[in-house]
Amino acid sequence: METSRLDSINRRKFIQIMGAGGVVLAAQPLVGCAGNEGSNSAPDQPWHVAGSGYSDPLRRALSYAILAPNPHNRQPWLVDLNSQNLTIDLYCDQSRKLPDTDPFDRQILIGLGCFSELLTMAAMEDGYKVDAEWFPQGTSEAKVDNRLVAKFRFIKSNVSSDPLFKQILARRSSRIPFDTEKGVKTETLQDLVSGLGDVQFTNQPSRVKALRKITTDAITVELNTDSAWYESVHLTRIGNSEVAANPDGISLGGTMMGMLKLFGMMSREKMMDRNSTAFKQGLQMQVDQMQATPSYVWVTTSANTRRDQLNAGQQYVRMNMKAAELGLLVHPVSQSLQEYSEMAELYKQVHKELNATGNQRVQMLARIGYGEASQPSPRWPLDSRIRNS
Ligand SMILES: Cc1cc2nc3c(=O)[nH]c(=O)nc-3n(C[C@H](O)[C@H](O)[C@H](O)COP(=O)(O)O)c2cc1C
């Protein structure tokens, strides 16, 4: 972490904000720095230690898998290891679900699909093929319960490495307005989704305009729906010490946030108060992001089974990594795809706009564009995710 650079950005932003007499939610989650404020390890440490210092191939692969994208950075993975048999049992951590914005655990499972894909890639890099048995104890369409999501078997073999493996550490979710002067070329988008059967894109101005409107309306609905918005607010970590104590959720780290918190200008209460500057500027900042979007990608599956959701995650993370390779930024905008009643109209609109008919289901929608890459997001250390360690 470049502490001095971060501090100077923070200072600049803080002065601007104090000068304007308002409060702004940081556009970028500025991750807290190592141990500054009482944490045992830096929230971004898992990004620095991935792959190194593990003699066990299962742990080595897992140290990469925990860097997967996942909704609200809840990191819902929990594993049991059997190093003798070279197997990993994957469970969904029941305490890390998002019941209000993800009532059927669909997005949580997409995150576990992303995790599984990174695990497989990292194992291949080490000369192991991974056989996955999905839901060996069955599953439910209503909830992802505490039964096994997957049993992974590592088999030593002659596998070649996956070219996208190199992008594991570079991949990000980027919550910034993209460069509107720089469109994304059709050939680049074709390259981005190549080999990913369920991923589609558009850079066509009329469709981009329609999607900007849907995603803007959806973020407005979400922030004005108590249950959905409060779920996010309760998972927001404000300032470095909160991020270090809980390296998950929505991280608003950095010195600036710490100062705003200290001066009482930023708090979960202020975020929940729709008359507050914190709320109004937070919403405006997200609307500005939605408008500054030159192109979109989305993942549509032919149905909405649990396997479809995992599969959507596997394809999504590959697209996200390919974007890193191509110098593109990706920002998922999932609000209109969520299954709570207040979103029903926009859910219908987005499926219509993206030509998803019958049983087809849009699983992910993301903004794509150019801009400055962000810092890595926090992660819990690997050991905390291993149940039988
Ligand atoms: C199913 C799913 C839905 C997501 N939806 C959103 C979203 O609506 N808005 C957003 O900013 N990020 C979204 N994300 C990105 C996560 O917030 C992000 O992966 C997580 O915070 C970790 O950050 P990283 O991807 O930079 O490592 C989503 C990710 C997944 C897998």
Image: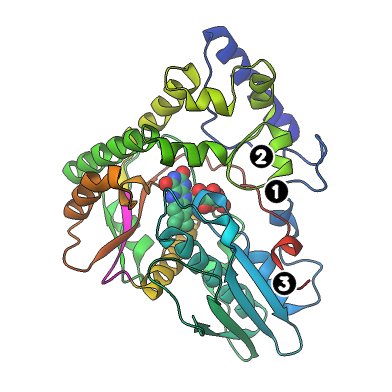
Q: Are marks 1 and 2 in contact (CB under 8 Å)?
A: yes
Q: CA–CA distance between discs 3 and 1?
A: 17 Å
Q: CA–CA distance between discs 2 and 3?
A: 24 Å
Mark 3: give few (<14), some (14-19) or many (20+) Cα within 10 Å.
Answer: many
| 104 on left or right of 302 | right
For badge 3, the amino acid type reads Arg
Q: Kindly identify which numbered label has been placed on residue 44.
A: 1
SS majority, magenta: strand
Q: Quadrant of the N terminus?
A: top right
Per the rendered image, the range of residues in magenta is 296-304
220 or 296: which is nearer to us? 220
Residue 53 within the segment the image draws in magenta: no
Q: Position of residue 383 (x, y in %)?
A: 76, 64
Query: Which type of secondary structure does the marked residue at label 2 adopt?
Result: loop
Q: Which residue is mark 3?
A: 60
Query: Which type of secondary structure does the marked residue at label 3 adopt?
Result: helix
- The residue at the point 19 percent across, 46 percent down is 207
Above or below 370: residue 60: below
Query: Which type of secondary structure does the marked residue at label 1 adopt?
Result: loop
Q: Earlier in the sequence, mark 3 or mark 1?
A: 1
Above or below 277: residue 70: below
| 124 on left or right of 183 | right
- The residue at the point 61 percent across, 59 percent down is 67
